[in-house]
Image (cartoon, helix red, strand yellow):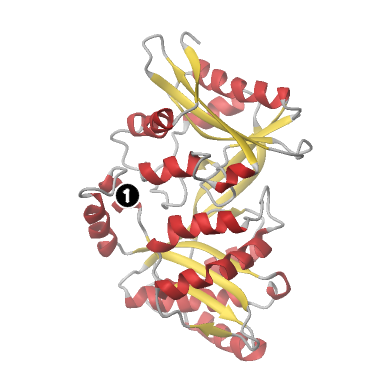
């Protein structure tokens, strides 16, 4: 590549790193920008407690004139983990093979120096951050918890001998204008049979109080998933501060057993995607008003996640969570929904989505390469 790879090692550089996609995707109707301040906090080792467990490095590719042509991040554990792949993410680049090669070779070289025999990505800093490369659904708007990329990314990665590690699929449910009576009956029966009840959340203060217990359920439910690492107490506090202020308690569904223990949780929220596009990465001074104006008008609910404790995973609890969520979204004037990515082998939840007439419309992929 004519130009150079430059490592980012300060806050000013992080803002350049975060800012590159704003130029790359300028004018693209499907790219949803992150909030710059939150993205910098997420990537900054001084503010994100994930870096107590990880070493993270960031690089940009520049042309001879010093203009950024691409970016990439890489993460390795501070101790152990050499039997697993080193991870890369935040990969964006212009449509030039040399730029993609230079960025990925930089990560591969560091991984080899640190004793790794493979690399995998794209992934976020943790399992709760946006990850996986879009490989189907380029004419669709992503949810705010996922991401968008140009189709040529796939071509360049596969040209560099990156192969599929795992795929995630996403669904849209286009017509949720009325309650699904079949699921309603199933949910009612399951609640009686299993002795669970819906916990009514009284406001954001109660939601924040329950956050550690909610994340405990998520940690347990997702522990077996690909590359999932349970969050520490400090990370739970970080994500609670980052995201819980945006959640509507009426769209957070929590099920408890007869003893009052949380056994399942469903998190959803009105689509932020058009609002984030309008805000253009900034909440101040006017971005917050532009964001909320779009959110108030949206007809789409983003189904962020469903998590069920291990011993309850065959009890049919997702049907209850979805039914209760459906009722709440209807009361707010929303009539369609989109899911976030789920493993393509997760047939149980896919059967639930299809009972609502869901259609798969996106596919994302994590790639792996042996070094």
Q: In which quarter of the image is residue 80?
A: top right
Q: Visible in this render: residue 368?
A: no
Q: Is mark 1 on a helix, strand or loop?
A: helix
Q: In this view, does 56 lie to the left or right of 29?
A: right
Residue 67: x %, y % from top left: 37, 17
Residue sitting farthest toward the bottom: 192
Density class for disc 1 (Cα within 10 Å; few <14, some 14-19, many ≥20) is many
Residue 307: x %, y % from top left: 60, 67
Closer to the camera in the image, 364 or 21: 21
Which residue appears at 63% of the width and 40% of the height?
54
Q: Is residue 318 left or right of residue 143?
A: right
Closer to the camera in the image, 155 or 24: 24
Q: Is residue 269 left or right of residue 171?
A: left
Q: In this rendering, is residue 110 above or below 74?
A: above
Q: How many labels does the image show?
A: 1
Residue highlighted by disc 1: 276
Q: In this rendering, is residue 103 above or below 272?
A: above
Q: Visible in this render: residue 143?
A: yes
Closer to the camera in the image, 364 or 46: 46
Which residue appears at 66% of the width and 24% of the height?
110
Residue 31: x %, y % from top left: 37, 41
Q: In this rendering, is residue 356 above or below 1?
A: below
Which residue appears at 48% of the width and 29% of the height?
152
Q: In which quarter of the image is residue 365?
A: top right
Q: Is residue 175 left or right of residue 366?
A: left
């Amino acid at each position: 590549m004519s130009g150079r790879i430059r490592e980012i090692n300060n806050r000013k550089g992080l803002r350049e790193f975060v800012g590159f996609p704003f130029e790359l995707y300028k004018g693209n109707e499907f790219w949803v920008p992150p909030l710059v301040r939150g993205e910098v906090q997420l990537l900054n080792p001084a503010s994100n407690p994930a870096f107590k467990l990880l070493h993270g490095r960031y690089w940009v590719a520049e042309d001879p004139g010093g203009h950024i042509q691409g970016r990439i991040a890489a993460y390795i554990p501070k101790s152990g983990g050499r039997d697993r792949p080193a991870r890369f993410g935040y990969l964006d680049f212009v449509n030039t093979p040399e730029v993609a090669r230079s960025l990925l070779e930089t990560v591969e070289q560091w991984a080899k120096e640190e004793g790794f025999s493979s690399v995998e990505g794209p992934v976020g800093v943790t399992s709760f951050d946006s990850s996986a490369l879009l490989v189907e659904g380029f004419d669709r708007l992503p949810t705010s918890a996922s991401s968008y990329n140009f189709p040529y990314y796939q071509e360049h990665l596969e040209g560099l001998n990156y192969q599929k590690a795992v795929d995630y699929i996403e669904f849209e449910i286009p017509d949720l204008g009325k309650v699904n009576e079949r699921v309603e009956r199933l949910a009612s029966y399951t609640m009686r049979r299993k002795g669970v009840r819906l916990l009514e959340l009284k406001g954001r203060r109660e939601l924040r109080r329950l956050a550690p217990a909610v994340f405990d359920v998520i940690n347990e439910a997702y522990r077996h998933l690909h590359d999932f690492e349970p969050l520490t107490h400090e990370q739970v506090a970080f994500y609670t501060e980052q995201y819980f202020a945006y959640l509507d308690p009426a769209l957070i569904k929590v099920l408890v057993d007869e003893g009052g223990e949380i056994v399942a949780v469903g998190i959803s929220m009105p689509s932020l995607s058009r609002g984030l596009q309008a805000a253009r990465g900034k909440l101040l001074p006017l971005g917050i008003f532009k964001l909320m104006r779009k959110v108030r008008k949206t007809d789409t609910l983003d189904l962020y996640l469903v998590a069920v404790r291990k011993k309850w995973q065959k009890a049919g609890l997702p049907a209850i969570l979805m039914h209760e969520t459906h009722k709440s979204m209807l009361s707010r004037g929303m009539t369609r929904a989109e899911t976030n990515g789920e493993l393509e082998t997760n047939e149980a939840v896919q059967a639930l989505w299809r009972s609502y007439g869901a259609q798969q419309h996106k596919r994302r992929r994590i790639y792996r390469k042996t070094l």
